[in-house]
Image (cartoon, rainbow, N blue to C red):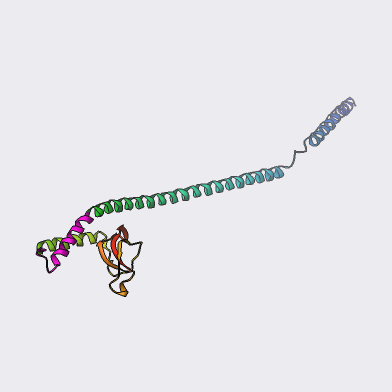
Amino acid sequence: MLKKIKDLMTNKDKQPAMEEQEELGQENIEQNPENEPVEKKSKKKSGGKTAQLTEEIEEMKIQLAEQKDKHLRLLAEFENFKKRTIREKLDTMNSAAQDTMSALLPVLDDFDRAKKVADDENSTEQFSEGVTLVYQKLYAILNQRGLNAMESNEVDFDPELHEAITDIPAPTPELKGKVIDTIEKGYLLNDKIIRYAKVVVGK
């Protein structure tokens, strides 16, 4: 009998304690609304990681586009630099060649005058065969380097090619406004005028 009474007393003591623990657990749930199921938490974490990875991928795409643009710009600048360097080199070579050719033009003028005198039937001077060969060879070499004499006699006077020294009455109507005589030959170097022809024009 005493044993039953003790058991009843023990159960009564345990019951409030259990009820108290249940109440505490309920309060914890109410106070922590974030205390969600494990499955929901894992879904939230997974969604956050995906968004972060997507953001990182977009940033990397932007960086890649910037690097590609920089590379293309550098490549274009290098190509322009190469073209400019080649052009400057050619300009320097052409300029040096022009100076050399211009310095030789008086020598060619002397050759032309000597040959013209020698070709005159009334002249006692002769243009020897050796000098003729030198004359022809010199002209051939200069011609290979791009030097060409203008053909100006009996062509229309062109102020962009000719420098009129004087004008005289044209011997025939067909020669009016044309070059009657060339006092000094004009020369082209690679199609660029390095000396204008000095001419007499018919009026």
Q: Write the residue at 83% across / 33% down.
A: 23
Judged left or right of residue 83, residue 112 is left
User: In the rendered view, would you say 11 is above or below 174?
Assistant: above
159 and 142: which one is in front? Answer: 159
How many numbered marks does the figure carry?
Answer: 0
Q: Is residue 105 magenta?
A: yes
Judged left or right of residue 156, residue 36 is right
Q: Give the quadrant of the C terminus.
A: bottom left
**Does the image show residue 189?**
no
Q: Write the residue at 35% across / 65% down.
A: 158
Q: Give the quadrant of the N terminus.
A: top right
User: In the rendered view, would you say 49 is above or below 159?
Assistant: above
The answer to which quarter of the image holds residue 146 is bottom left
139 and 70: which one is in front? Answer: 139
Q: Write the residue at 27% across / 53% down.
A: 97
The answer to which quarter of the image holds residue 202 is bottom left
> Given the current orientation, which residue lies at the most extreme bottom position?
173
The answer to which quarter of the image holds residue 130 is bottom left
Q: Residue 67 appears at what percent x and percent y?
A: 50, 47
Q: Residue 156 appears at what percent x and percent y?
A: 33, 69
Q: Residue 122 appears at what percent x and percent y?
A: 12, 68
Q: Magenta residues: mostly which secondary structure?
A: helix
**Does the image show residue 50?**
yes
Range of magenta residues: 104-127
